[in-house]
Image (tube, grey):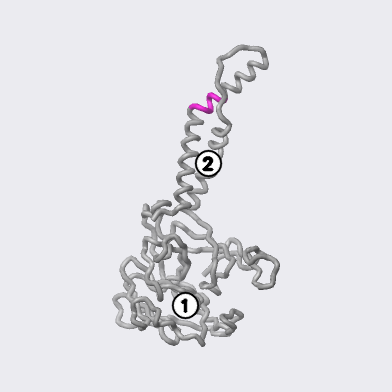
Amino acid sequence: MANTFALILVLVTLFTGIIWILDKLRWGSNRRLQSAQENCEVSGAQGEVVSPQPRWIESTASVFPVIALVLVLRSFIYEPFQIPSGSMMPTLLVGDFILVDKFSYGLKDPVFRHKLVEMSKPERGDLVVFKYPPQPNIDYIKRVVGIPGDTVKYSEGKRLCIQKQGESSCDLVPVDYIHPSLFTQRGVNLTQVQEYLGKEAHQILINSYMPNQTEQYYMTQGLGEWLVPDRQYFVMGDNRDNSKDSRFWGFVPETHLVGKAVGIWISFEFNEQADGFLPSWVPVGVRFNRIGGIN
């Protein structure tokens, strides 16, 4: 499925690029002749008559370098995204604006997302932005838990266990630093846990009073166990009891990967009071302490 915004950006770049080339090869020289003709008229000299060029040609040609730069940056290097929900708390908060590395998992054409250059593969613990499989026009962000060949198990005690391909045992993902947090869900304080998945530790939230929604699990008959297929990934939100992820809708195909989240470039705080006079989407402050890298 084509990305509508990317398609529009590519078409605008092509159009302005064609105008820019024609302006350089032909129209620009005509414009210079016209300018020279006007100078001759001022001085009283006679010269070849050149018809004036429309003003929009020069304006369109002038914006081409800027649009082309935006296309290259957004398609192949970094793209900004906004975090709209709390499924990745405490790692990411509503109002965080993140930068996504577009080349980590391979360069793709910006419209149809066919891979052009192979790079690295996602690893356990990576924060990835991807096209939501049931609705590919929507972008999601979750953490990679299982890679191809892994068997992922999620217990009633809310512990992750990963059996890697070729191994006979399932290893519990190490956790520690368990303490109450300031985050709540329906009036219940969530427990904040440090989890060691991949190369670096990260924080997750657990609602100890909420049972797992096993009856809604994807293709497991409520067992909480998934075998990750080839070229697909199992992802979960860090806010484990407030995240619709691979447990409920399945795996993320490699072709749906957009990039790796690498940093927060700005973070806005919004009005959360029901009786506030400002709309909930209007920022009321900037969280400067959140700007920087993310795990």
**In percent of the image, x 41 and y 75: which residue is there?**
248
Position of residue 282 measured from the top left corner of the image (x, y, whole percent): 65, 63
Amino acid type of the residue that numbered disc 2 sits on in the rendered structure = Pro
Is residue 285 shown left or right of residue 234? right
Helix, strand or loop at disc 2?
A: helix
Q: Identify the mark nearer the N-term, 1 or 2.
A: 2
Position of residue 198 measured from the top left corner of the image (x, y, whole percent): 44, 73
Per the image, the residue denoted by label 2 is 65
Q: 173 or 37: which is nearer to us?
A: 37
Gap in angstroms between the C-alphas marked 1 and 2: 45 Å
Query: What predominant SS class does the magenta segment belong to?
Result: helix
**In percent of the image, x 48 and y 75: which residue is there?**
243
- Which of pointers 1 and 2 indicates the residue nearer the eye? 2
Amino acid type of the residue that numbered disc 1 sits on in the rendered structure = Tyr
Position of residue 271 measured from the top left corner of the image (x, y, whole percent): 66, 69
Q: Is residue 212 visible?
A: yes
Query: Is residue 27 part of the magenta span, yes or no?
Result: yes
**In percent of the image, x 34 and y 79: which residue is there?**
220
Determine the image quadrant of residue 92.
bottom right
Q: What stretch is highlighted in magenta?
A: 26-31
Q: Is residue 201 visible?
A: no
* 10 Å crowding of disc 1: few (<14), some (14-19), many (20+): some
Position of residue 272 measured from the top left corner of the image (x, y, whole percent): 64, 71
Q: 198 or 193: which is nearer to us?
A: 193
Q: Residue 58 carries which label?
A: none
Per the image, the residue denoted by label 1 is 196
Query: Is residue 83 part of the magenta span, yes or no?
Result: no
- Say above or below: 229 vs 39: below
Determine the image quadrant of residue 57.
top right
- Say above or below: 139 vs 160: above
